[in-house]
Amino acid sequence: MSDLQKSRSILQAAKKVMVITGAGISTESGIPTFRGEGGYWRGHRAEDLASPEGFKKNPRLVWDWYGERRTLVSKAQPNVAHLALASWSKRRGGISLLTQNVDELHERAGQTDTVLLHGSLWKNRCRKCKFEHRACELAYPTLPRCKVCNEITGPGVIWFGEALDFSSFHALNLCSIEADVILTIGTSGLVSPTADFIKRAQTKYNTTLINVNPTESNIQATIELRYKATEIIPELTAD
Ligand code: OAD
């Protein structure tokens, strides 16, 4: 039996499946990953821009970067992997999808109840008073200010050094306890706390882990499916 067939039967037999996606699932929609060559922007590392310190130091530079990301994402379309996961979730219950991505392509593919672990590109969040709202501007000629406290407000993305929202953390914890199987797609498995919950599920609950990634990653899977997401997710999730 091939790894794909094994994975299919494990997923079909599972009562609760936790799907965790990362930037790799959106690369085929034209959005670069963080740790590939796309991880740099005008010579800056993503980690230096996506941080409270980076924003404090140069909010204009950070908003220019996020403005370009919003422009890129606004032109991107969900790909067949996003679409296959959305229809699979509709057809069979017991699937929780948690994504590290902020592009909302899962939602645009029709996925419901997605847990946005790292927030959304399409929100603005004030780091002073925590006021948050939907926002779709692709550029800010003058830096946006919080409607409540008038502080310069940033994108509603969870940055390096910031904690996940409680609801996301709770979902990550609960799903990783309850899942019979974890399916990881397009993530390097390097970023906490997601990476920690994956490891805890495996060591503490002996959870089966199926990983979809064309290259080596930090994920130690039960079954490694070395494919691009669009190459295998439609087949993996077909009835
Ligand atoms: P990374 O850029 O760390 O990893 C993306 C993974 O996707 C890599 O392991 C690639 O090999 C893999 N990949 C590339 N193309 C693929 C494809 N077509 N199909 C499947 N996999 C593919 O991105 P993440 O693991 O998501 O945080 O990074 C986690 C977080 O680090 C991100 O959410 C971001 C970043 O800082 C925030 O934005 C707050």
Image (cartoon, rainbow, N blue to C red):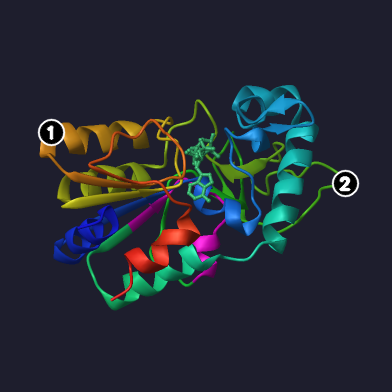
Q: Is residue 170 magenta?
A: no
Question: Which residue sits at x=67%, y=56%?
Answer: 73
- Marks 1 and 2, how far apart at CA: 50 Å
Name the residue that disc number 2 marks. 141
Residue 72 falls left or right of residue 28: right
- Disc 1 element: helix
Residue 189 visible within the image: yes
- Give the amino acid type for the residue marked by disc 2 in the picture: Pro
Residue 230 drawn at (x, y percent)? 49, 61
In this view of the protein, can residue 112 be seen by the observer? no
In the rendered image, residue 93, in percent from the top left (x then y), is placed at: 24, 71
The first of marks 1 and 2 along the sequence is 2
Which residue is situated farthest in the front direction here? 1
Residue plotted at (42% across, 30% down):
190
- State the extent of the magenta-drawn residues as a range: 97-109
Residue 199 image offset from top left, x and y in percent: 25, 32
Q: Is residue 168 left or right of residue 205?
A: right
Q: Amino acid at mark 1?
A: Lys
In the image, is 22 to the left or to the right of 32?
left
CB-based contact (under 8 Å), mark 1 and mark 2 = no
Count the marks.
Answer: 2
Relative image position of residue 30 (x, y in whole percent): 66, 54
Which of the image's four quarters has the N terminus?
Answer: bottom left
Query: Which residue matches tag 1?
Result: 204
Q: Nearer the viewer, mark 1 or mark 2?
A: 1
Q: Residue at x 25, y 74 (%)?
A: 92
Q: Label 1 neighbourhood size at 10 Å, few (<14), some (14-19), many (20+)? A: few
